[in-house]
Image (cartoon, grey):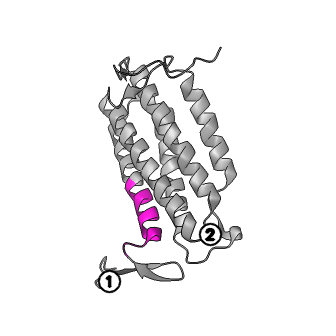
Amino acid sequence: MKVYTRTGDTGETSVIGGRVTKDDNQVEAYGTIDELNCFVGQAISLMGEDQLFVDLKEQLLEIQHELFDCGSDLAFVKLSESKYKVRGELVDRLELWLDTCEKENPTLERFILPGGDILSSTLHVCRTVCRRAERRTVTLGKEKDINPHVRKYLNRLSDYFFVIARTVNARKEVADIEYVRSQKVFKSEQ
């Protein structure tokens, strides 16, 4: 099989059910999700065989498959709800993972700077690319009907990346770096 088809040389690409320009908001949305998936793969690679991250590595691998599902749900010209791959249960499961990991993290009072361990920094990159994918999906949703669960999933997923970036630092005993000009903006739950 040849990788190149030459069908995109005129600035168009195929979506499921038709063709659009390569800068179409639909392509921007699922293309940004693909970019995010690459950074998730990088984060997994950085984990290597470290036993500290077995649970997170399994979760991230599952997320990679789900990101493909998100892209697929956005790649249709016209999609019926019966064909959706992303459903509300995925959002619920992300919330469970978030709550579990958050218990390991130190109390957060101020904004923090992305950083600490290299893996944590990469997960912050995942968070910001995820936020961009969410924005692109919102823009697409203004033009056409989309699976609303994709937008919800991306919103919760960016929270997940923030939390596990902190979990990685906590497990490696690397302190989060507080933004020094931040007021106390988070209230601890008691």
User: Is disc 2 surrounded by few (<14), some (14 to 19) or many (20+) residues within 10 Å?
Assistant: few
Q: Is residue 151 magenta?
A: no
Q: Are dots 2 and 1 in contact, CB under 8 Å? A: no
Extreme-top residue of the structure: 190
Q: Is residue 63 left or right of residue 22?
A: right
Q: Is residue 51 in view from this perspective?
A: no
Residue 25 percent across, percent down from the top left: 45, 69
Q: Is residue 161 left or right of residue 4?
A: right
Q: Is residue 151 in view from this perspective?
A: yes
Which badge, 2 or 1, comes first in the chain's sequence?
Answer: 1
Residue 172 percent across, percent down from the top left: 38, 21
- Real-space Cα separation, disc 2 to disc 1, in angstroms: 30 Å
Location of residue 126 by image quarter: top left
Mark 2: amino acid: Asp
Mark 1: amino acid: Thr
Residue 156 percent across, percent down from the top left: 56, 43
User: Is disc 1 surrounded by few (<14), some (14 to 19) or many (20+) residues within 10 Å?
Assistant: few
Q: Is residue 84 above or below residue 187?
A: below
Residue nearer the viewer, 144 or 68: 144
Location of residue 119 by image quarter: top left
> Which disc is residue 145 wearing?
2
Q: Which residues are magenta?
A: 22-35
Q: Quadrant of the N terminus?
A: bottom left
Residue 55 percent across, percent down from the top left: 51, 34
Residue at figure coordinates x 44%, y 19% from the top left: 183
Residue at figure coordinates x 56%, y 66% from the top left: 142
Q: Is residue 165 above or below residue 158?
A: above
Q: Is residue 41 above or below residue 17?
A: above
Location of residue 49 by image quarter: top left
Provide the residue designation for mark 1: 5
Q: Nearer the viewer, mark 2 or mark 1?
A: 2
Q: Quadrant of the C terminus?
A: top right
